[in-house]
Amino acid sequence: MTTQQPILTADAILERGLKNLWYPICPSHMVGREPVSLRRLGKKLVFWRDHDNQVHALDDHCPHRGAPLSKGIVMGDRIACGYHGVQVRCDGTVTRVPGSPGCKLEGSRPTQAYHIVERNDAIWLYNATGNIDTPPPLVLPDELDADGEFSSFLCYTEWKGDYRYVLDNVMDPMHGTYLHKQSHSMAEGDNTAAFRIRDTDRGFIFEKEGQRDVNFDWTEWADTGTHWMRLEIPYPKTGGPGGNFVIVGSYTPISPTLAAVFHWRCRKLDGWQRDTWRFLYRNRLEARHWAVLEQDRVMLEDMEADANQNEHLYQHDMGIVRLRRHLKNLAKAELERMQQGKA
Amino acid sequence: MDRYLEPHQARRHEPTQYESLLGDAIERAYAAGTHDLAGLVAYLNRTGPGPQDGEVWTEEIYKAQIAKLAEE
C-alpha cells in the first residue's frame, strides 16, 4: 500500500512546527510511569518515565502495523505494543518480535525517537527530522536559568486555534493598553505609541518609542535552539520589591486548531522577597495573572481561522510582520532542505 | 473540558484563612510603599495577623515562616 504524500508548502511546515528545534511539550507532571499519548508538532507521540525518572518519547506508532504504542506496556526503556507484543526501545530500535523471533524487524530502528530534557517544570522535545544521537543544547533565557537570580512559575494552557495567533498576540504589545486595560497591572501608559524594531544577536526586540517600564512596552523574540519570546510588565506597588514581572513564552502546535501555550512568570528576587512573592503568587497573584491571560484566550479563540487572510495592518503590527516573514523564511529553508533530501 | 485550562497550577492546597489574611496584610504594607523587611515586620505587628510561631513578628521569624509558606 502506498500513501499519497500531500504537497508540502512553507505554510504547512509552519502549521506543524519547524524541525530541528526544541519545543516545550507539557508540564512535567503530565508524564509518569504509564505511557501517555500526546499530539504535538503534527504527530502523535508517546511519552513515559523509566525507573530513573528519565522521560522517553517515540512516535506513537508501532512499526509493525501502526497500533498506538501508548496502549502498550512499559518495560523500563522499552514499550511492548499492546497489539502483538512488539518491543520498541527508547532509541527507536525494535528489540523483540515475540510472535516471529528472528524476523527482519528485530534489530532494525524504524521508529523515530526524540531527545527529551526537563527544564523549568516542563518536558522539552527536540524535533529532529530523524533519529540523531546528540541534539544541540537547549538554551533558555536567563530568567529560566535554574541557578540564576530569577524565581519562576510555569503556567501551561491549551488554546483553540493555530499557535501562530499566539505568537502574533505576544508580538503585539499595544493590545495590553486596550484588552488588558482592566487588569491589575496594565492600566498605565499612553494609548497611542510609535514602535521600532531593534536587532539582537539572537533575534529582535519590538518596542515602544519613549515608553519603558510603564505598561506592556516591548517584546523580544529569540532563537537559542528553541524559539521563545520575552516581555516585561511593571507590577503595581502591591507587588512589592523586585521590579518588573517578566514573562517568557514558548508555543507549540498541538494541531492546526489547538496550541500548547507555555508562560513562565518570573521575578528577579532572592531571600524573603522571593519567598514573599512565591507565597503571594500561590495565594492570590496566580488568579489575577490567570484572569489577564484569559482575556487573551477568549479574544484569540473567537478569531476566525482565516482572520490573518483579511487584515489591514498598521505601524503597531511591524513586529508581527517581521516575525511572520522570519518564520516563513525558516520554513522555506526547511522546505528546500527536504527537497534536496537533506532535511 | 476539551483542553487544559487549569487556573491554579502553583497551589498545592486551597488557601487557608490565615494565609489569606497574611496575604492581605502584606499587600497593604506593599501598597503603602513599605518594601523593606523591618518596615514589613513592624506593619504586621501593628495590624496583624500575628506569627504562627512566636508572640510577635521578628525579621527572623518572618523569614522562616514565609520561606515555609512559599513552598506549601
Image (spheres, helix red, strand yellow):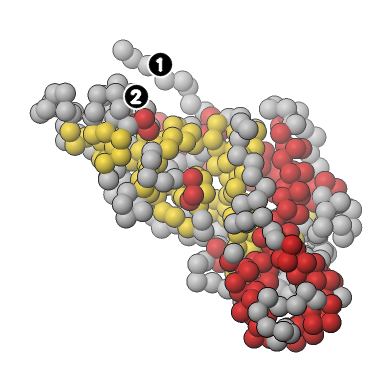
Q: Name the residue under label 2.
A: A67
**Would you identify the image quadrant in which residue A1 lies?**
top left
Q: Which residue is at 75% across, 37% downward?
A: A298
Instruction: Report the side of A217 relative to A53 (left or right).
Output: right
Q: Which residue is at 37% across, 33% downward?
A: A70
Please determine whether, in this image, residue B35 is positioned above or below residue A259.
below
Q: Which residue is at 44% across, 32% downward?
A: A44
Relative depth, front residue between A117 and A229: A117
Q: Can residue A261 be seen in this view?
A: yes
Do pointers 2 and 1 mark residues of a single chain? yes
Relative depth, front residue between A21 and A62: A62
Q: Name the residue under label 1.
A: A4
Does label 2 or label 1 sit earlier along the sequence? 1
SS type, badge 1: loop
- As measured in the structure, the alpha-carbon distance from the residue carrying label 2 to the one carrying label 1 is 20 Å
- Callout 1 crowding tier (Cα within 10 Å): few <14, some 14–19, many ≥20: few
**Would you identify the image quadrant in which residue A88 lies?**
top left
Nearer the viewer's eye, disc 2 or disc 1? 2
Q: What residue type is labelled 1?
A: Gln
SS type, badge 2: loop
Relative depth, front residue between A140 and A276: A276
